[in-house]
Image: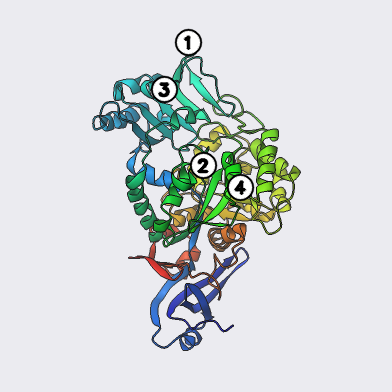
Amino acid sequence: MTPPRASLVLRGQVVVAARPDGIETAEAIGVADGRVVSAGSERDVVEAAAPGAVVIDARDAAIVPGIHDFHLHLVGMARARRALRLEGARNPAQLLGLVSRRAAHVPAGAWLIGHGWNEASLDAGALGGLEAAVGERPTFLSSQDGHSAWASAAARRRAGLAAATPDPMDGRVERGPSGEPNGILREGATELVGRIAGRLKGQPLADALDEELSELAGWGVTGATDAGDYDDANGVGAYAVLGDSFSSLAEMASMIAPRLRLTLDIPADAIASAAEHGLRTGAAVAGLRFGWAKAYADGALGSRTAALFAPYSCPEAVGSGILRLGPDRLEAIIGTARQAGISVAIHAIGDRAAAVVLDAIDGAAPRLPGSASDRLEHAQLVRAADRPRFAALGVTASVQPIHAPADRESAESCWAGRTAHAYAYRSLADAGALLAFGSDAPVATANPWVGLFAAVRRRQPGEAEPGWHLEQALDPVAALSAYTLAPAAAIGARDEGNLRPGARADLAVLSIDLATLLAADERLATTHADLTLVAGSETHRS
């Protein structure tokens, strides 16, 4: 069948595809009915276009396949826009000052929600100060990495949290000398209070999400995979049994689908419910796409809960982290997912967690023919012996390059003697792993150009220090591939992540030329999209 003639032509410095081993370029592409129908020389593409076709002349600007953020938390990003932001606090006094000022504007008895504190801004002596700052307002403050929380006494009372409350199997309640909870909750224990804490929802959530979608489009992001929730609680609407994030985003699909090609993960708790709905990885659902079943094998470096083979080396940490899922539980989750035709995405930051997850996948039944690859999320510390197993087992390394420079200080302190194996993107790629890049927003910025800079330079823009473990740096084309072709390959969507004829016309016209993009220098910090298209339709124009 003859493809339709282009109704839209874009000419400029077109990246047709960024492969890990090279780049395909063209002078122009033609678009019709939401897909690329031609790519090549400007003359050939223009001559093949339909009479009266619209021509967009990007001149010297780079035109790239739309970025796919392979790991973000879209509902969390929207809620973080309205929550108290605590990232700027550098010590307990600053942290409590921010909380106290916000509390003055929160009615008595109403929830105060905050996000973004880190271990350096908190110490044991500060814990009692929260009550003075918030009074009887129930307060729930999640850490920057999302794996710890600080709950006020009023919040703990509402949750029924007391000295007799046992630690959950996948978490820990920090306690004072008397055994009473001191307010700090780790890993699965965060949900003891978190599941009842006040949540932005309904129209206020939709308004905040609309702002997030606009910001993503402004960076040239046309696709994303939402990494979902800890559990299947707090769902709404038709897909309530699949958890808060999945169901909330499905309810707002009519607003999302024209602007972002979104894939939705579910918590592992919801696999059976998804199967009852007839859903499997890759299926269309509410105009979006059903993704992976997400589970947490361990915690995070920031909370000192990532599961390690050897103990933490930083003085404030105790032990070797928290293994949230042991081999038996992982085996059960993967087995149930296999039967349902659902692929799995397992969070594993520490080297012990990564090894346990790979062992479980190795011992599981094969995936159904044609199903999407399983994923190991973050892979921040992976032993050399485990790196080739990603390719051998068909496991995608879902990593976030901005974490490497952001975590540098903590890794040097807490993983002393092991940092050569940390954020080892080049070694994973050399071992054959498929690297797919994301941001982990709102834990880190969703700006993909800052992420690409971090992957290439192993530092953040503006930092004076040399790049950290530069032997693990990627070249710019490989990094761009990890944001475009790799996510498409992971889900099995050959018509995404590139601008070859037949591909979906998801693309961005950048504010820089191709040479600047491939230089991957400080100019990436201010890079944005002048024009973004999803399925050939404009979602952003600056």
Query: Viewer-proximal residue, 84 or 13?
Result: 84
Q: Is mark 4 on a helix, strand or loop?
A: helix
Q: Assess whether mark 3 and mark 4 are in contact (beta carbons under 8 angstroms).
A: no
Q: Which mark is residue 241?
A: 2
Q: In this view, does 90 lie above or below 425?
A: above
Q: How many marks?
A: 4
Of marks 4 and 3, the one in the foreground: 4
Residue matched to label 4: 275
Q: Is residue 87 left or right of residue 166?
A: left
Residue 485 position in % (x across, y down) = 57, 63
Asked if residue 73 shows in the view, the reply is no
Q: In this view, does 154 lie to the left or right of 324?
A: left
- Reading the chain from its start, which is encountered first: label 4 or label 3? 3
Disc 4/disc 3 C-alpha distance (Å): 35 Å
Look at label 4 and name its amino acid: Ala
Q: What element carries label 3?
A: helix
